[in-house]
Image (cartoon, rainbow, N blue to C red):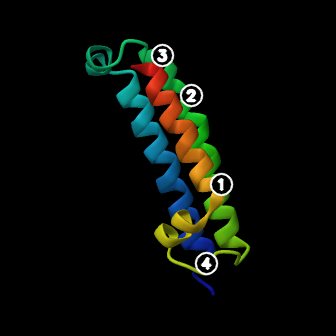
Amino acid sequence: MTDLEHVSSIGTAGGLIAVLVLALYISSKEVLLLYTHAEVLWLVCPVMLYWISRVWMLAYRNCMDDDPVVFAVKDSKSYLTAAIIGAILFFAE
């Protein structure tokens, strides 16, 4: 358990960087060609920040017994997060 803090920090930073990459993608010119209402895509970033923070918090509290992918498949809030992102993508088209 001595590596828990280190792995948690790296994982959290990786998740935040993934949201940063998403934000850079949203702000690119190519997105304007793919989406009619590209500005709506900015709503995905806070949803992703919530989900990544929640997953790492649960992992840090030892509330995640499975692989993160298995956890996401079993977790109802992950489904809700995916549905919200799906709705955002639908309205961005």
Is residue 79 visible to us here? yes
Q: Amino acid at mark 2?
A: Leu
> Which mark is in front, 3 or 1?
1
Residue at image position (52%, 31%) is: 87
Q: Residue 4: which disc?
A: 4
Q: Residues within 10 Å of mark 4 (few under 14, many from 20)?
A: few
Which residue has dot 3 on it? 39
Spatial CA span between label 3 and label 2: 8 Å
Q: Nearer the viewer, residue 83 or 58?
A: 83
Q: Residue 55: which disc?
A: none
Which residue has dot 1 on it? 77
Spatial CA span between label 3 and label 4: 38 Å
Q: Amino acid at mark 3?
A: Glu
Q: Amino acid at mark 4?
A: Leu
Q: Residues within 10 Å of mark 2 (few under 14, many from 20)?
A: some
Location of the N terminus by quadrant is: bottom right
Is residue 52 visible to us here? no
Q: Residues within 10 Å of mark 3 (few under 14, many from 20)?
A: few
Callout 2: helix, strand or loop? helix
34 vs 63, left or right, is left
Spatial CA span between label 3 and label 1: 25 Å
Q: Residue 43: which disc?
A: 2
Spatial CA span between label 4 and label 2: 31 Å
Q: Position of residue 92 (x, y in %)?
A: 44, 20
Q: Position of residue 25 (x, y in %)?
A: 35, 30
Callout 3: helix, strand or loop? helix
> Which mark is in front, 2 or 1?
1
